[in-house]
Image (cartoon, grey):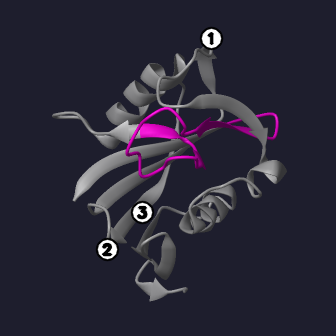
Amino acid sequence: MKNTTLCYIEREGAYLLLHRIKKENDLNRDKWIGIGGHFEENESPEDCVLREAREETGLTLLSPRYCGIVTFVSDRWEGEYMHLFHATDFAGTLRDCDEGVLEWVPKEKFRGLPQWEGDKLFLDLMEKRTPFFSLKLRYEGDALREAVLNGEAIL
């Protein structure tokens, strides 16, 4: 299982989203997601999310909130532990990203954009400020087949 981070940066009712359209063979191709990526050697989740934010956006996150761990299981892709963060404070100037197009998207518009079905579940938990959680999402192809929150099935 690989370890990754994902962060939703929020400003004035909008999320900074990455429309993943630039990388070939990208499992997130054409999806709208937060920013983040794979851990490097000896990084903590916090180290990783701060580095990835700087690399992908040019922004320095100030006190990102660690929301939970999402375990992805798939019949098509490698398993993943994704560490979810939310940030409202940051410094710096936004720059272009080589993985896709960055755009501030109003939260109400985001729900209608292409994204993984399970993302809506952890976004709801994040937005409700649910205490630190563990969410397991099992996919068959692109279809979400199981969701388990803190050990209890919710789908």
- Asked whether, in this view, residue 131 is left or right of residue 46, the answer is right
The residue lying toward the viewer, choosing from 128 and 113, is 113
Q: Which mark is residue 75?
A: 2
Residue position for label 3: 70
At x 81%, y 34%, the residue is 12
Q: Which mark is residue 139?
A: none
At x 66%, y 55%, the residue is 114
Label 2 sits on a secondary structure element that is loop
Say if residue 87 shows up in the picture. no
Q: Position of residue 15 (x, y in %)?
A: 70, 39
Residue position for label 1: 93
At x 77%, y 57%, the residue is 112
Residue type at the position of mark 3: Val
Q: Position of residue 77 (x, y in %)?
A: 31, 62
Residue type at the position of mark 1: Thr
Q: Which residues are magenta?
A: 10-36
